[in-house]
């Protein structure tokens, strides 16, 4: 299982749909995607992780890096995730306090700070 | 010897293989299905850290993974050949001399008293991870530091109750274990 990435826009939000496994091998691809979006002026990102089967600390690092990038442009990075095994990793690392985590893309798109 | 031993070139693409093998052997050993995700993640983190250490030190030797099935527990050891490097969690719960709450055990290499052995081992290099470490919440890792394995250790300490990290001048080993139930028969 490799990493799959696709993007689409809804209003001023860019949805990044991620599927597969985010680990030390595949995380650079996600980083490239996030960097490219920010460089192209997309500062409000929603990362949909419903299709993610595996996430490790390398993936967390990339998401934190993405958050730093969008915040530099007063943007936002929201996550969509309902999977307990993925949410657990955010919890044990304290990152649930850092990322807004939503149960659906619609909810994330509608959310404002 | 270990039930299954795995040696792999220190490259990111092989970490997934180690995860899959570890999960398969753990399942056979009788580790609870609900815990297999944790086994997979923990061994992945340990291997990712080892790969990062080998790459950053330019080591060509493989990363070693030993999967050991005992009567009541399943253990995984992930070994690297990177020279000792002091490490600590932001909460100061890993590594020797880590401060309050952390118990460090200095052990001399060889049989002689510390400093007396010909090997001149780094006695201060021995560090143990304590169960309390999982209560620590590390700061998010800045992107520039994401490859240094500290976040990986934090995840492991949050996931695994029984974990021990030892390092010396010749490398390091992360030992983790999980209880098993009745072995799964074929």
Image: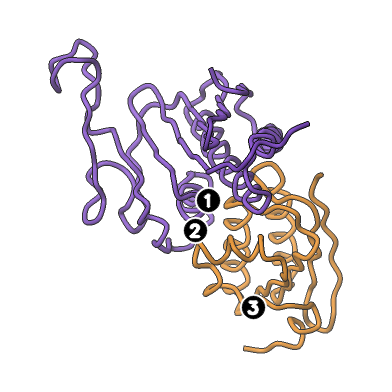
Chain colours: A orange, B purple
The foreground one among B86 and B7 is B7
Instruction: Find residue A13 and report its image quarter.
Output: bottom right
Protein chain holding label 3 = A
* Label 3 to label 1: alpha-carbon separation: 22 Å
Residue A20 falls left or right of residue B35: right
**Label pair 3/1, CB-CB below 8 angstroms:** no
**Label pair 1/2, CB-CB below 8 angstroms:** yes
Give the crowd class for mark 2: few <14, some 14-19, many >=20 residues within 10 Å. Answer: few
Foreground disc of the pair 3, 1? 1
At x 85% / y 61%, what residue is drawn? A6
* Label 3 to label 2: alpha-carbon separation: 18 Å
- Name the residue tied to disc 3: A75
- Name the residue tied to disc 1: B146
Q: Name the secondary structure under disc 3.
A: loop
- Name the residue tied to disc 2: B142
* Label 1 to label 2: alpha-carbon separation: 6 Å
């Amino acid at each position: 299982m490799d990493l799959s990435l696709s993007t689409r826009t809804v209003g001023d939000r860019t949805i990044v749909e991620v599927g597969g496994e985010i680990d030390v091998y595949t995380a650079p691809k996600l980083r490239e995607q996030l960097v490219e979006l920010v460089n192209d002026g997309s500062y409000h990102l929603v990362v949909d992780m419903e299709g993610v089967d595996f996430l490790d600390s390398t993936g967390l690092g990339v998401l934190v890096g993405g958050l730093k990038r969008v915040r530099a442009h007063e943007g936002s990075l929201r996550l969509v995730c309902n999977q307990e095994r993925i949410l657990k990793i955010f919890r044990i690392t304290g990152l649930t306090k850092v990322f807004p985590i939503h149960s659906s893309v619609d909810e994330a798109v509608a959310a404002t700070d | 010897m270990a039930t299954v031993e795995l040696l792999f070139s220190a490259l990111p693409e092989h970490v997934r293989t180690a995860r899959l093998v570890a999960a398969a052997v753990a399942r056979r050993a009788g580790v609870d299905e609900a815990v297999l995700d944790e086994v997979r993640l923990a061994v992945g983190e340990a291997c990712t850290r080892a790969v990062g250490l080998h790459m950053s030190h330019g080591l060509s030797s493989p990363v070693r993974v030993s999967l050991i099935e005992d009567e009541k527990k399943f253990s995984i050891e992930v070994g690297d050949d990177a020279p000792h490097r002091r490490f600590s969690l932001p909460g100061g719960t890993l590594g020797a001399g880590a401060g309050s709450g952390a118990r460090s055990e200095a052990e001399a290499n060889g049989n002689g008293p510390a400093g007396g052995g010909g090997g001149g081992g780094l006695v201060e290099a021995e560090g143990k991870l304590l169960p309390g470490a999982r209560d620590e919440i590390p700061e998010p890792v800045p992107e520039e530091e994401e490859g240094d394995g500290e976040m990986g250790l934090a995840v492991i300490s949050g996931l695994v109750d029984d974990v021990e990290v030892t390092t010396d001048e010749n490398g390091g080993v992360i030992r983790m274990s999980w209880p098993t139930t009745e072995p799964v028969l074929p």
